[in-house]
Image (cartoon, rainbow, N blue to C red):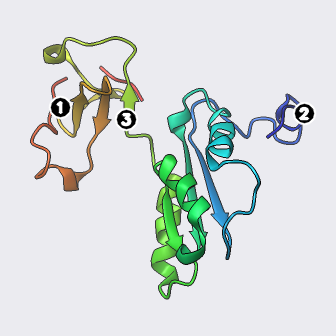
Amino acid sequence: MTPPLAAPGGPNDGFLREDAGLRIIYVDDEDDQSPDPVADYVTTLQSLKVDPDRVSLAALVDPTQSTRWSQAVTSTNGIQEDISGANWFNLVSNLASFCTSRQNTFKLSHTPVVESLAVWTGPASLPWGWYYDAVLNAVTRCSTRWFSARTTCRGRGALSP
């Protein structure tokens, strides 16, 4: 994704869309042998997006041989799967879910008046299924499995993803 390749008219023109997340999957049967610290590589990848939180890494690796891959995955809230796993259906399903996951957290540019928050997706108002996180100053969509665990996963009435 160097500038000559990603430049307008280049072979990767349009690959990095501003509104899309970037998911990278590593497949390896041994640990990464690169000379620089893992954090340097992660920072370089995250610099490809305006919001570095939109970059996540996944690794399909041997967990006994993947210290560096694990560090990269952990630092981007990604996932790691065991390459020698017996259940390839679950493994591939997990990777597919990882690659197609939508953004669930939307950082706000200003601190809101919480009681007046309203969440919209397209033309529809979302009266429930989200919560405001004051620490992140963000609105997060909930999955249904969170409703029993997160009593704050309810809200009223503006966010456009």
**Mark 1 or 2 closer to N-term?**
2
- Disc 2 packing (10 Å; few <14; some 14–19; many ≥20): few
Mark 1 vs mark 3, foreground winner is 3
Q: Do tag 1 and tag 3 residues touch (Cβ < 8 Å)?
A: no
Q: CA–CA distance between discs 1 and 3?
A: 17 Å
- Disc 1 packing (10 Å; few <14; some 14–19; many ≥20): few
Mark 3: amino acid: Thr
**Mark 2 or 3 closer to N-term?**
2
Q: Residue at x 23, y 28 (%)?
A: 132
Q: Do tag 2 and tag 3 residues touch (Cβ < 8 Å)?
A: no
Q: Quadrant of the C terminus?
A: top left
Mark 1 vs mark 2, foreground winner is 2
Q: Residue at x 68, y 71 (%)?
A: 28
In this orientation, which residue lies closer to the viewer: 129 or 95?
A: 95
Q: Quadrant of the N terminus?
A: top right
Q: Residue at x 57, y 53 (%)?
A: 72
Where does residue 70 sit, x and y in percent of width and height? 53, 61
Mark 2: amino acid: Pro
Asked where in the image residue 110 lies, by quadrant, the reply is: top left
Element at label 1: loop
Asked where in the image residue 3 lies, by quadrant, the reply is: top right
Mark 1: amino acid: Pro
Looking at the rendered structure, which numbered label has been put on residue 127?
1
Which residue has dot 3 on it?
A: 105
Looking at the rendered structure, which numbered label has been put on residue 4?
2
Where does residue 47 sit, x and y in percent of width and height? 66, 32
**Mark 1 or 3 closer to N-term?**
3
Q: CA–CA distance between discs 1 and 2?
A: 46 Å
